[in-house]
Amino acid sequence: MTITCYINNTKQKADSNETILSVLNRIGISIPTLCNMKELSPTGACRLCVVEDAETGELITSCSTPVRENMKIFTHSPEVINARKTIIELLLANHPENCLYCDKSGNCELQKLSEDLNIREKVFYGDLMSRKTDRSSPGIVRDMSKCILCGRCVRICDEILGISAIDLINRGKNTSIETVFQKGLFYSDCIHCGLCVTACPTGAIMAKSSINQVIEKLGNNKTTKSIMIPTTTIANIAVSYNIRKYEDARNMLVAALHSIGFNKVYPMSLFNDFFISEATSIIQNRLKNSPQPLIITDCPAIKKYIQIKEPELVEFLCKIPAPQQIGAKILSMQESTDLLMSVSPCIAHKYEAVQTQNTNKGVPEIDFVLTSDELDKLLKTLGITLPFTRKETPDNPANSDSSAGVFFETKHGITEGIVRELFHRSDLSVQLNRIIEIKPEKDFIEYEFEINKTYYSVACISGIENLVKYKKQILQGNYLFVEVRSCKSGCIDGCGQKLTDSQDSQKRLRKTLSEYDEKTSNNTPGKNPFIKGFYRNNKLGNIF
Amino acid sequence: MKNLKDKTYKTLFIDAVELEKAPQYSKPVEMPHIYVERNTGSIVSGIDATIQYIKKYFDKDENYKLIETGSLGISSFDPVIGIQIHGRPLIFFKNVTFSYVSTILDSILNHILPESDFILGQISHTGLSSWADVPELYQLDIFAKQNRRILKNFGLIQPDFIESYIDYDGYKAFAETITRKTAAEVCNIIEKSGLRGRGGGAFNTGKKWQKALNTGKSQKYFICNADESDPGSFSGRLLAENNPHLVIEGILIGAYAVNARKAFIYIRNTYTLAIERLENALFQAQKAGLTGEDIFGSGINIEIEIFKGPGAYVCGEETALIASMEGERGTPKPKPPYPSEDGLFGQPTVVNNIETVCNVPYILNYGGDEFQKAGLNNSFGTKLFSISGKTDITGVIEIDLGTSVAEIMDICITKQRQPEIKAVHIGGPSGGFIDPDKFSINLDYETAIDNKLGLGSGSFLVLDKTNCIIDITKYFIKFINNESCGKCIPCREGSQRLLEILNRISEKPSEYNKHESLLRFKGVTQLEQISSLMQKTSLCGLGQNAPNTILSGLLRFRQEYEEHIYERQCEANVCRNLKEYYVVVDNCVGCGICAKKCPADAIIGTEHQAHFIIQDRCIKCGVCEASCKFNAIMIK
Amino acid sequence: MEKYISKLPDKVYKHELLSYLQEFQDMFGYIDLSFIEVLSKNSGIPSGKIFGITSFYNQFRFKPKGKFHIQVCEGSSCHVNAEIGLIEDIKKLIKADEKDTSNDGLYSLEIIPCMGACSQGPVISINGKFHTKVSKEDIKKIFSDLNL
């Protein structure tokens, strides 16, 4: 039902089911919020979104109050501004004042709010909180003294994931956000998907940084050092620094990394090719008969999520390790290196690197995993300005990859690669640049294709929460396989890349990768010479 | 239904209960009847030992009857026992700890009155020869000045016997309601009576019921909130402990009126005795056919269950209470939706305070007009107040809404002592201070709000000159700070800041932080600023009402705040960290006068040498400073 | 304890959580992590969440009670009538904070909003035995008389 309301004395139409906040957002009035989250029900916790009901003079929360017929609202009356200001001042009273040293600085919502509300003086002086910092996880640091208890991370972990690795504990002044029995994230059910890292408005939950250790290691000239860089990181660099072509960005990055002391730089696309090859071999066996569902993912978060939340799906989970771990194994067969590092668009891979199956007598196969942002920072720290002046080609053995491996990390990339490779191995020509069209808004797509007059269908699920939502389809859909990834746009919107917050830059990232794909003739792993050579000496499916 | 209408209500139970078993004080007795008032307050005061000694006194002589009753309501009389012997009326004794049992029994069983210190009063009755020179219990000031509707017969009713309750016309209202009135009629009666929620919100109860009754959904819930747990309020516990059947009757009527088939009593887990007695009462009610299926052949089923609240003050707020019953953290939710539309398990739910519920049987027994004879403005009926603090009596009294503070003072404290009273704090954490100039104000909901107060659940804390307003304010804010659910920023952070500011005001500025002296002076303005924010923007009543204590204190005792801030002086000498006395070594001649005069033995030193003050022992009385002739004692 | 935990029904509903926790607390005096984990398994509610819910309420403690469980009333009447710093003294004496147990396992402290004996304040109770109108001096004596 359409109703009329008056906002700051102007007449507006609204739907009777709408909240005040949604009306205000629609007509372009911006209201500060901290606890409000799209897709989740309002909790009314932060009270920042208050507006004044002109009739009663009361302050009401716009996120939870529905509009009424003939309602009159002031969104920025002095009283409202004052209330918002005081709320932020209360939060700032005992917030650590070390913004200079905070990783979140410049990107922090609390900082921005106090700027927007013109808070330029400390009003209240509170006793500093003595909350602990949880460093147990390899990927996430939770500095609870910076926590403003907006509850976003808790709600994501609960309402979207259903994991609740962290929850609000205690009450009143002792309220904090903790894991079960305060044992630390590493010992909790945390799947390291990083959603809480993206959700946190302040620097309370951050990706763990290993830059300093890395710098120290790089300083040692006597050791050999290798690094693997994923294609999304390269694309991320390309978009950030306006480098138009993927290969330019890649080669600049290779040169830059060489110059700061890495002996070998390998793009991850090669190991993505291995992943596709391995997966295709498994699937080839299923072409005639696929009795059970098969879930294919390279995402460590999804794997842990299935273990914790959906244990009955574990048996359907494809056991191929993620490309970075494949890389570690293949590289160890090829040559010895003192320091092996990898870059990742998210923090889940930091966690993956220390999982028991990826360690050797407790020593991880990969020494450090950096996020894309960390790599960016590392380069800056070491005086590298991008775009880099020099370009160098990636090192052997990885100076050969396929465009499927490059595209692998985007949405539906696994499926795309596998289908291409299936076509290739069935002697069908792989001419189309892109088999599966990406629809950014869709969380679940099905794709049907034909090999030797038989039709097969596959499905792709994006977003962790959708695994549960489409569980029935996984189990009963009779798919050749199902691709699942925890981030909605594939790895390109991983929590380790600041850039991917906006839809626009995600689009540009994808474009950079597609353009490379369009002009590369090696468009499937089977056409990658290194892969071909490798499998001549090693049997498929046996190396892991 | 029709034939039910012709029956008098007691006959409805005739098969289930044995009414003649209930002892009545109005009838003459053969063997001595000893009434012992057992409730939490009296247990702490030692009633159990008293009972033991009574049993020991009679030893193997079984020619007596021990009757366990509930409390009269005045806990400062505890332990109370009543004795009725052959031919005489029931006489009550107060403060009977075990050592006095034999003395009292020795004399009374021989028809001799013991020392008057113990005598409380008697309930005379025709046909029984009264005790000479013993006042009538109900004519004692403390009872005569009350209007005991809910508390009627408290102290005589045996909480563990349904017969005893029925004997005093219990369950009459419910029996007549379920057999003769429709749910809508009951809602109407309650609405017209003007009964308002006694928990603090003061919303019209009947309207709430009508709203729930008129929602389309079939499954509805009725919850009686007996969680209480305000510091200094114990009326809810008194009701549940000493007359559980009254609570059950009120719930049954309420559940019937809103068409709820399931009702809950939400009670604090620490109220062990109350839970025990409610459980027993529910069992008896079930046996008597008052709960369960097809009550009195009406075809109506009502089930009552006890939910033990795991302990959080904020669960007094209805949405938080519902959240905790659903197995969640007890945090309030934004309203709307209101629980009467979308409550427990998403169903329409009515949540009423235990005191509200206990008013319901009275209204149905005597009618709304009679109910309205008590009260002032738009606040009708009576209200329980929990009297505590620096009073002569401590306990729960029931008075008309709109009674003035001065009248309550007359009940609980003697005229001679009244000038010593500095303030009264009313309404617990959501209430505020009243100074003696304002003792004339009437305690009804309207006047209370006009005076920046909330009646809350009716705590009445009396303070004298030895209490510091800032210290009491700190106490309540600390409570709020602890009990806030921690969800919304104004309440969680606001109360924390308020507490920090209050702490700063009541302590000496620390040297290492130069900001602090400035901050102390800013204190009052900041208290006002935060208070106003909390009132306007907090999510629930807990936070919205929390600043009342501060605002009323600033309004009526501003001078005390200013003394603390500017002069570092706490008149009550409670805030002892405001200053530190020290000896100026160069000036001290070691005469030792200060050491002799110090009441706390905090000054030491040998003769003719500089003395020293032990800070841990110092009570900051200032005697040393006044007695020193050499200006050797200074303040930091 | 293991025996009790093993008797837990296979299906626990959310609204029953608190009553199971209460039962466990009543029997063992504290909530053990293993119990939360089993509850989580049987109810399908993540253990982190159950911990969040449990820690919200006063009733539940996560350390076993001490040999002497001390309950102190902090009602307004007890506060008004108590000597300044009484509760702090007790905390110092037993070396334990609220909801906490001293390291030697001797004492545990619980602060109760009101014990219902406002005429007798300040009231403390040690293992169920009440001490009324206690002063700082009384406290010292009461504790020195405890049979350690």
Image: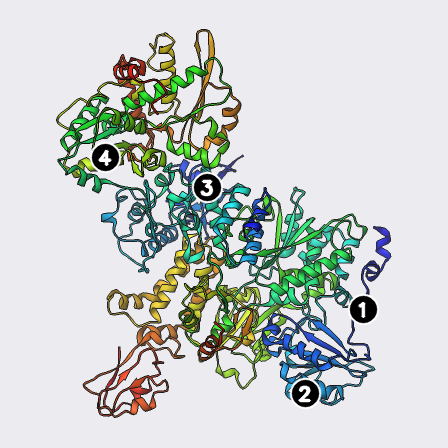
Q: Is residue C19 above or below residue A248?
A: below
Marks 1 and 2, how far apart at CA? 30 Å
Please report the residue visible at 17 percent of the width from the left and 22 percent of the height from the top.
Answer: A393
Question: What chain letter is assigned to the residue under label 1?
Answer: B
Marks 2 and 3, how far apart at CA? 67 Å
Residue B505, horizontal then vertical, whole percent: 34, 70
Q: Pointer 3: residues within 10 angstroms few (<14), some, or many (20+)?
A: some
Q: Pointer 1: residues within 10 angstroms few (<14), some, or many (20+)?
A: few
Secondary element at tag 1: helix
- Snapshot quadrant of residue B581: bottom left
Q: Amino acid at mark 3?
A: Asp
Residue C26, horizontal then vertical, whole percent: 56, 58
- The residue that disc 3 covers is A158
Is A462 in front, or is A182?
A: A182
- The residue that disc 1 covers is B21
Q: Are marks 2 and 3 on the same chain?
A: no
Marks 3 and 4, how far apart at CA? 31 Å
Is B399 in front, or is A481?
A: A481
- The residue that disc 4 covers is A375
Q: Amino acid at mark 1?
A: Lys
